Image: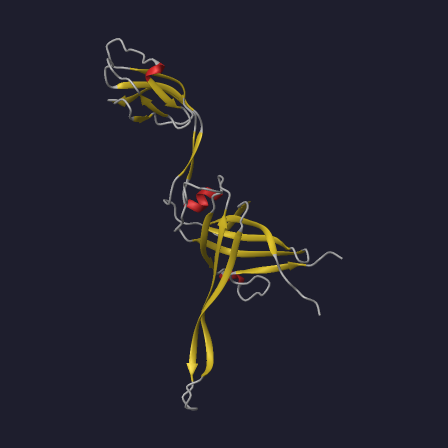
Amino acid sequence: MAINLISLQGKIFLAKIINGVVGPSFAVGNAPDFKISTDADVIKHNESMSGHRTTDFTMTKTRSVMFEGELEEIDENTLPYILDGKVTDIAAETVASRNLGTVVAGQAVSLGGFNVTDEVITDSTASPVTVDKSKYKLDAKFGTIIFNDVAGLEMPLKAAFKTGKASIVSINDSETAEYELTFQGINTVNNESIEVKLWRTKKDPKTEFPLIHEDFGSYKISGECLSKIENGTDPALGLFGRMVVVSTAE
């Protein structure tokens, strides 16, 4: 007798749905754990004739499909998906004069940009004094500056500099979007190909995003599959999704 075991590996793809139209898909990268689960609200009927009140009929009232998994890679697609955020690209900029206010030695001051170059700091005297670079330390990548000596400088200080490009992802300020979710994998027991497609998924907006890791970071996600009513009772489609076992080429 044949033993049909299963051990799946594969890739997860997401495609954003806008106004009912499925857009281009993107891979989420390595996902060490991903699963779907089904549930149903079942109503039971108990008979009252035998004296044992046995269940003699059940009716399924509602059905549901859930998903949960773990993502390990973040990029311009997966990060806004995890954080329910919006992506904004910041262009490089040349700032002629930015008021830094009254600066105190030892405190970090933000220049308001990233990848800062060509910075020139001056004070507010009638003939502005250029602050010597030995009097401050610039973290160019994050655009922050710490002054170690402000003696004799007229406040407020002002900064001229250039910034580089950066990409911003806001945090939890975007309505959770719908995505078509596709798993394309292989049963490593027999090399059979399997595809699972969920027509409409919506991620739970509650997400933990660790900022400090002792090892590799990973991000747990979960959500619900919404039904696609227009599929009707077509068994080749399914209301929530379908699993396809791809026949081995002969």
> Residue drawn at (26%, 17%), measured in percent from left and top?
150
Q: Can residue 167 be seen in this view?
A: yes
Residue 196, image quadrant = bottom right
Residue pictured at 40% horizontal, 88% vertical = 48
Residue 90 lies, with reference to residue 127, above or below; the image says below
Q: Nearer the viewer, residue 53 or 238?
A: 53
Could you tell me which quadrant the C terminus lies in?
A: bottom right
Q: Where is residue 106 in the image (x, y as percent from the top left)?
A: 29, 24
- Residue found 49% across the figure and 64% down from its top: 38
Residue drawn 32% across the image and 12% down it? 130
Tell me the quadrant of the picture where the N terminus can be found.
bottom right
* Farthest-out residue, front: 214
How many numbered discs sit on the rendered protein? 0
Front in this rendered view, residue 219 or 48: 219
Q: 79 or 208: nearer the eye?
A: 208
Give percent across and percent down for residue 217. 47, 43
